[in-house]
């Protein structure tokens, strides 16, 4: 028997409807929500993500201003651009597409953002609110929040559940751990130095994978009855993307699973736009 | 057979020797390390902690300036004091004793500190560095760091070990989770909504308890061969303090355990002073 799929698009559409209502309210107050996207270099996936934000923005009545700079742009120039975005009253959110070229310090760029315009929650202050459980004050990173929104809106109960979280990166794993603890899950965080990951994943009720490695979680690491959330996005040989979970095997075993593509990744741009609305509130403008 | 004890004082003394060397170096550069401690109200334990910082400071050649304000001091006045400390070039570290009186927002006070003078790592920026794994840029909260220093300096290997962390508070549990993940432990975080905590603690190699409840971890929740770190500090009926672990039962079962008093708590003031030295470096003064 095949697992039930949690598809991202229907949930994204539901959130978009909520955003459209908020955008209309803002416009009646004379606020035209605007997101500045900075793309440095020509990373192929980043170009796709940036364009997708423009398209989604169009649908929601949100202005998306894309700034593209060549790969040899200096860190100083990038920081100057951030300063301009920070100072611009008409820009409510800033997103810097990652990865940045190697000569530019990601840490310096993240720390330069106005935390209240940081719609992907990468500034240390937003991460700190997350660690402190002060989610109402934080702009929360899109991918971890997408994982939680998918579960919550699909009716997956998190409270009191044993969750195996595979991955401890600063973009997804660690922020997601904070979100899950706050929602009363009992989480075990697995990573490359963990002994016997299969024993941990098999014993969990929910398995969330955000490791960035194709087929890291195989069918024999899963159990019947589980919910599997796959936050991995990996380029497939020959084109297309795939997740961190061996999907074909997994869907024969578990109860519920998110596909890749079409799962977590389908929600992230929408979450960014939702964060933009929250950012406007945090800026005291709404 | 009784467990081996990890006592805090010998480790604190070792760290103090290192601090004295650093303080001497700073003084030859004309820098006189100084910590400002703000105590609002008359919480009995806080008075003891504040005094203990003065004593330890004396031994290390570190100036400790204690400011005591009555319990009815307004938040505005407290924030003004913080601003003065922030602006004072001769003050390198600021510690606000907790708990604050209820009329004062702990969050507002924490967020007002200059992050580079925040020697107990309570500012969102320092928590954010911790969540992001950027420990070199962070001032790390004393109690979680004390737990890690105790283990590391007592020769307890953390890497690859299964750790049950009991407690998810913003002061100890969550920051400690970040420190342990960074040190390659495989952690499971238990809390009030966790089902069957005993099964999790029994299966761990290291049990760290920071829940703030007397005798929360009883002997039947532990297994032979374990290391137990007790970060709890609870007032005992009739005076004195005790930890979160039922010590008499635990020491008959496990391999290694920290006592309370005399364990984690014996290290925290020393860690604060060590953080003060790090703060001076982060301020670009060393």
Image: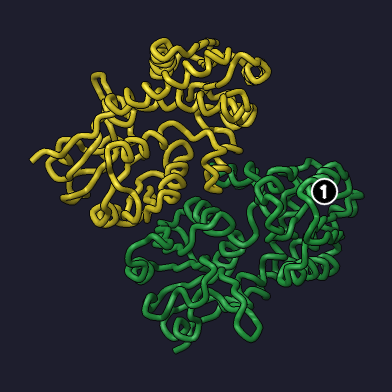
Chain colours: A yellow, B green
Percent x, y of residue B209: 49, 68
Left/right of residue B32 with respect to residue B99 in the rendered view: right
Percent x, y of residue A57: 43, 14
Q: Based on the displayed image, in which of its 4 quarters is residue B6 positioned?
A: bottom right
Q: Secondary structure at mark 1?
A: helix
The relative height of residue B24 versus residue B247 in the rendered view (above or below) is above
Q: Residue at x 50, y 82 (%)?
A: B247
The relative height of residue B273 versus residue A179 in the rendered view (above or below) is below
Left/right of residue B234 with respect to residue B197 in the rendered view: right
- Residue B14 appearing in the image: yes
Q: What residue does disc 1 label?
A: B77
Residue at the farthest bottom position: B1
In the rendered image, the quadrant that contains the N terminus of chain A is top left
- Residue A188 appearing in the image: no
Q: Residues within 10 Å of mark 1 (few under 14, many from 20)?
A: few
Residue A72 or residue A166, whichever sits in front: A166
Percent x, y of residue B233: 60, 72
């Amino acid at each position: 028997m095949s697992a039930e799929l949690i598809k991202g698009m229907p949930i994204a559409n539901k959130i978009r409807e909520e955003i459209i209502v908020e955008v209309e309210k803002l416009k009646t107050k004379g606020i035209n929500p605007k997101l500045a996207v900075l793309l440095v270099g020509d990373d192929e996936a980043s170009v796709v993500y940036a364009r997708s934000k423009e398209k989604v923005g169009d649908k929601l009545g949100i202005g998306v201003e894309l700034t593209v700079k060549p790969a040899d742009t200096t860190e100083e120039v990038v920081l100057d651009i951030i300063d301009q975005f920070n100072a611009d009253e008409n820009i409510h959110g800033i997103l810097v597409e990652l990865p940045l070229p190697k000569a530019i310090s990601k840490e310096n760029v993240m720390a330069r953002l106005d935390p209240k315009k940081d719609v992907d929650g990468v500034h240390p202050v937003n991460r700190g609110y997350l660690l402190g459980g002060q989610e109402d004050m934080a702009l929360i990173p899109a991918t971890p929040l997408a994982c939680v929104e998918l579960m919550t809106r699909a009716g997956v109960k998190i409270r009191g559940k044993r969750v195996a979280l595979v991955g401890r990166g600063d973009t997804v794993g660690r922020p997601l751990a904070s979100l899950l603890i706050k929602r009363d899950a009992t989480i075990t965080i697995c990573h490359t130095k963990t002994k016997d990951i299969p024993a941990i994943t098999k014993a969990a009720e929910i398995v969330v994978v955000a490791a960035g490695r194709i087929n890291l979680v195989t069918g024999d690491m899963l159990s019947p009855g589980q919910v599997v959330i796959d936050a991995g996005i990996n380029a497939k040989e020959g084109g297309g993307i795939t997740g961190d979970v061996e999907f074909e095997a997994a869907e024969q075993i578990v109860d519920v699973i998110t596909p890749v593509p079409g799962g977590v990744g389908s929600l992230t741009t929408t979450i960014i736009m939702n964060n933009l609305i929250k950012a406007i509130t945090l800026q005291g403008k709404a």
